[in-house]
Amino acid sequence: MERSRRGAWCTLFGQVEAGFIAKAAGRTWGAGSELLWKGLAAQGLWFAWTEPERPWVGSAPPCDEVDKQLFRVGTYVQLGDGNKATFWNCSWLNGRAPRDIALGLFKLAWRKNRTVKEDITDQQWTRGLWKMDSVELMAQFVFLWDAVQQIHLSPDEIFWRWSANGAYTTKSAYLAQFKGTFCTFDADAIWHAHAEGKHRFFAWLLVQSKVLTTDNLVARNWPCDPICTLCDQTFETAAHLCLHCSYARQVWVSVSN
């Protein structure tokens, strides 16, 4: 069974990709397996661009909005003739998709899956935008209008941001989802600091967000005043109490002097 599964992966994704998928599937569970699946789901969107002869291209890919957003963020389209890139959903406008630049206008637009060429012909992309009712939407419209007027069409190309050659890999999509999700700070260094034990213990609680500041007390449904009692200006958190509070800043200035 495992051999047949690996053979199917090799057929779909190639030998190198299949090797990574097999290893990742064997060592991930929970949230990790979900991120692997999202990487695989976005692969179908990539093949729709680069290998349109694949038999499943043209059918609805098994992707949710998060998968599609990952694909938009991970790709940029070098606009050509505008026959492949969709106006609202592809990252063709300075590396960003118009829907991510002007979400309010995207919600008002009548047809959201037309190509760039179809939509810029006779300014079709503006249909439905007459319902703008705020200064923010009007500002977004002016920005998009100016950008669209500078478009000159030739064959479309798409590139993946997170690989050296610009080609999509499941591994790069999987790893990209971990960016910014964990801290690189070495908390063990706290225990080697030249300080009293109680100070090191407090610092360890601080970096673990375990100090019982009012934000943590509120999360535990303890009755308390969430406003900082030292400055009486904003909500009390560990970072505010130790770094951003006006009283704490005065203490740090006094210590540094």
Image (cartoon, grey):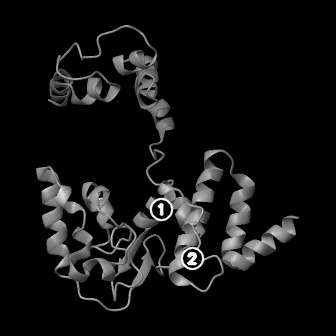
Residue type at mark 1: give it.
Answer: Lys
Q: Amino acid at mark 2?
A: Gly
The answer to whether 139 appears left or right of 215 in the picture is: left
Quickly name the residue at label 2: 58
**Can residue 212 be seen in the rendering of this structure?**
no
Q: Position of residue 3 (x, y in %)?
A: 86, 69
Tell me the distance, in whole angstroms, between the alpha carbons under discs 2 and 1.
16 Å
Location of residue 190 by image quarter: top left
Residue placed under numbered mark 1 in the picture: 68
Element type at mark 1: helix
Task: Give percent across and percent down for residue 53.
Answer: 60, 86
Residue at the image position 35 percent from the left and 17 percent from the top:
214
The residue at the far right in this view is 1
The quadrant where residue 43 appears: bottom right
Given residues 127 and 48, the one toward you in this image is: 127
Rendering coords of residue 218 (x, y %): 39, 16
Please rate how many residues cluster around mark 1, counting C-alpha atoms within 10 Å: few if below 14, some from 14 to 19, many from 20. some
Residue situated in front as seen by the camera: 184 or 189: 184
Circles 2 and 1, Cβ within 8 Å, touching? The answer is no
